[in-house]
Structure formats: structure tokens, C-alpha cells
Image: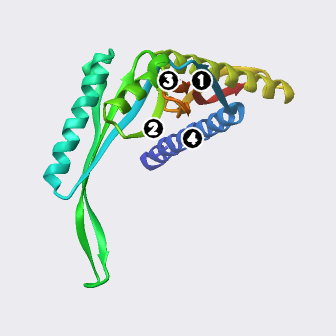
Amino acid sequence: MNTYYTYYMKKSRKIIGLLVLFALLVTLSVSAAEEIRTVTVTGTATVTVEADRASLNLGVRTQAEDAEKASQANAQKVQSVMDALKEAGIPEENITTNYYYVNALYDYSSFTGEDVVKGYQVSNSLTVIVDEIDRAGEMIDIALAAGANSCDGISFQSSASLGAYDEALSGALLEGRRKAELIAQATGETLGSLVSVTESYGSYSGMRYAKVEAAMDRASGTAIMADGLDFSATVQMTFSLK
């Protein structure tokens, strides 16, 4: 047996060995792909809680021929509103500025064919958090009596928001598993282990607007009816099938 033949046989054995190993790996890969069967479902749950805080957007609008005069008049009225609310029990930190605008007011002149400035309007909006939700209507009346002349919106919040969403998320996970088990049973399979789970999105209606009823007579005051707040969670879950 010459040297060339010996080298050729060793080389051939190496190539055959590599081919066999490659074929085995491909077979194992195909088998693994064929054996892994999954089911993917979506679970959603909603938890409703009672609101316990109100957020009021109360504003003061003033007009004057001069911007400075309009601003000064506005500042005085806003300060009166803030003082009245604080005297009624609203903490200073619960009163913040929402927006502040100074706008020119125009009249169209048919003589010149141009808009002519006739004055200025200053708008100052305050966001007021009322921790005692039953007093929300009372706070509106107090603000109006002190000089506020607009209410841009009322919304509700809940101190139980975090716990409510956690409960909704747990419910979504249980709902996802229930649906996966139902699908597995209907298809003659057995539900296996959880392969992956993704929190798709959550929704929070914590700024739901209030129903407001202004009484015909001032003695009755403004009535505010709070609605429940919905916290929703959605997850996508993938389970193996056996």
C-alpha cells in the first residue's frame, strides 16, 4: 500500500465522517421542528373601581383694551379663586396652572379693509385636585363665586389604580390559559408549558369625564356624579402542545 493510497483513504474517511455528522444534525433539526407544536392566544381582562378623587379645570378670562390691564385684572381674580379654594380646605400643592394665554381681540374695519385690535383677552386655567370627591361640586361653586368664569373639564381618578391594573393583568393571564386549554382540548391535544408571554397593552379610563348638573337655583349647588373607572390589560401567550 503506497503513501498516496493511504493519504487518500484517510482523507475520504474524514469527508464521509463530516457528511454523516451533517446528515445527523439535519435529521435532529427536522425532528425537533416537527415535534414542537404550539398554540398562541390573547387574554384580556378589565377591572372597574370607584373614583375617589376629582380633577377640576377652572379658569378665569378677563378682557381690557390694554394687555397689561387685562393681565392685572386676571391675576387678581385668579388669586381670589386660589385663596377661596385654600380656605375651603384644598391644599396649595393641589392647585396648579394648566395654561395661561394672552390673545389680541380684533374687529374688522370696513373702512380700511383690515382687522383692527380692539383689546386683549387673558385666560388662566387652574387644575384643582379634590381629594374628597363628594366636595367636587362645592369646589366649583366656591371658585365661581370667587371670580372663576369657566370650567374646562372635570375628570375622575382613583388611588387604587395600580392595584386595579395588577388585578386586570392577573385576570388576563388566567383568561389566556383558559383559552389555550380550550383550544388544546378541542383539537385533541394536551396543553404543555408556557413558551412565551408578552404584555400587549393596557388601557386606563382614569380621566373619564364627569356628569355635571348645575342646579336652577344657586342654593342647591352644582351636583357631580362620578362614574366607575375601567382598567384593562391584554397579554399574548404561547404554549407548547403535547
Give x and y (percent) for residue 233. Answer: 58, 28
Kindly state the secondary structure of the residue where label 2 is placed. Answer: strand
Q: Which residue is mark 1?
A: 228
Residue 38 or 98: which is nearer the viewer?
A: 98
Quarter of the rendering occupied by the C terminus: top right
Kindly state the secondary structure of the residue where label 1 is placed. Answer: loop
Kindly state the secondary structure of the residue where label 3 is placed. Answer: loop
Spatial distance from mark 3 to mark 4, Cα to Cα?
90 Å
State which tag comes first along the sequence, 2 or 1.
2
- Badge number at residue 22: 4
Give x and y (percent) for residue 14. Answer: 50, 40
Please report contact status of discs 3 and 1: CB closer than 8 Å, yes or no: no
Residue 164 or 136: which is nearer the viewer?
A: 136
The residue under the point 24% across, 30% down is 80
The residue under the point 57% across, 16% down is 167
Amino acid type at image mark 3 = Ala
Q: Is residue 198 above or below residue 111?
A: above
Spatial distance from mark 2 to mark 1, Cα to Cα?
17 Å
Q: Which residue is mark 2?
A: 153
Q: Which residue is mark 3?
A: 219
State which tag comes first along the sequence, 2 or 3.
2
Give x and y (percent) for residue 235. Answer: 59, 29
Badge 4: how crowded within 10 Å, few (<14), some, or many (20+)? Answer: few
The answer to whether residue 194 is seen in the rendering is no
State which tag comes first along the sequence, 4 or 1.
4
Mark 3 or mark 4, whichever is nearer to me = 3
Mark 2 or mark 4, whichever is nearer to me = 2
